[in-house]
Image: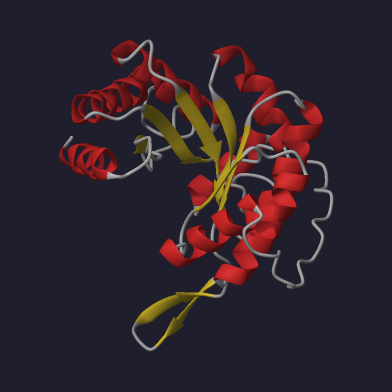
Amino acid sequence: RAAAQNARAAADAADHTVLVAGSMGPTGELLVPMGSMTYDECRDAFAEQARGLVEGGVDILWVETMSDLDEVKAAVEGARSVAPDLPICATMSYDTRGRTMMGVTGAQMVQQLAALGLTAVGANCGNNLIDTEAALAEMHAAAPDMLLIAKANAGMPRYEGDKLIYDGTPDVMAAYADRVRGNGISLIGGCCGSGPAHIRMMRQVLDGAIPVPEVTLVPAQPAPEAAPARTRERRVRRG
């Protein structure tokens, strides 16, 4: 709630309209039968988070960095129990050749979440720009009329001394923003490693205020057929 209140105050002080999104990430637990958390426990945990965010004044509830479709569904159900009229968006993290850790493809995501009536869905975080783009391409092909979100990490992290540095410069992210817009993505932002300089240049490019930076982006390759999600869940649980 306190974080949402701070964001609300900053948004209200801006000289233009700023929406505040309340972020809810994964619990870090596997749902039964692969883990110990029940669906109801998961739903209630997200309802508690959503309540604090709503009390803090958010405009949108944003379920993100997910790997498991059932956890997404529990999060949405929990959020709706607290704020039935607030818009909800959901994004998953694609970090295994265009799939989530649990083996979910972009096409599976939009097909299974379509019935939830979400404002928008998409991909955030992930292993790299290309994995994220591959998943988004599947989403757009499977549901061309759905509002899609792209919030990739700013490249790959590496340590330089005691600092964690991401290799995705503002130029790289701005060129990426232009690329995904051309592939049917409507809501474009950044995730880990993205700072004000990244977002500023992305906005300038998308607005046409500056030319698209000349950087090389390797085209995303079609993802191979996914292994069954249960097999991947067992592998994750064994560590």
| Residue visible at 71% across and 46% down in the picture | 181
Residue 106, picture quadrant? top right
Residue 231, picture quadrant? top right
Q: Nearer the viewer, residue 214 or 239?
A: 214
Q: Nearer the viewer, residue 145 or 239?
A: 145
The answer to whether residue 96 shows anywhere in this view is no
Image coords of residue 238 (percent x, y): 50, 50
Is 179 rendered above or below residue 29?
below
In the rendered image, the quadrant that contains the N terminus is top left
Image coords of residue 223 (percent x, y): 80, 48
| Residue visible at 56% across and 42% down in the picture | 234
Question: Which residue, as the protein is rendered here, is positioned at the far left?
Answer: 2
| Residue visible at 37% across and 32% down in the picture | 36
The answer to whether residue 56 shows anywhere in this view is yes
Image coords of residue 151 (percent x, y): 55, 49
Question: Which residue, as the protein is rendered here, is positioned at the far bottom?
Answer: 161
Q: Nearer the viewer, residue 95 or 231?
A: 95
With 34 as the anchor, is 52 left or right in this view? left
Image coords of residue 124 (percent x, y): 54, 47
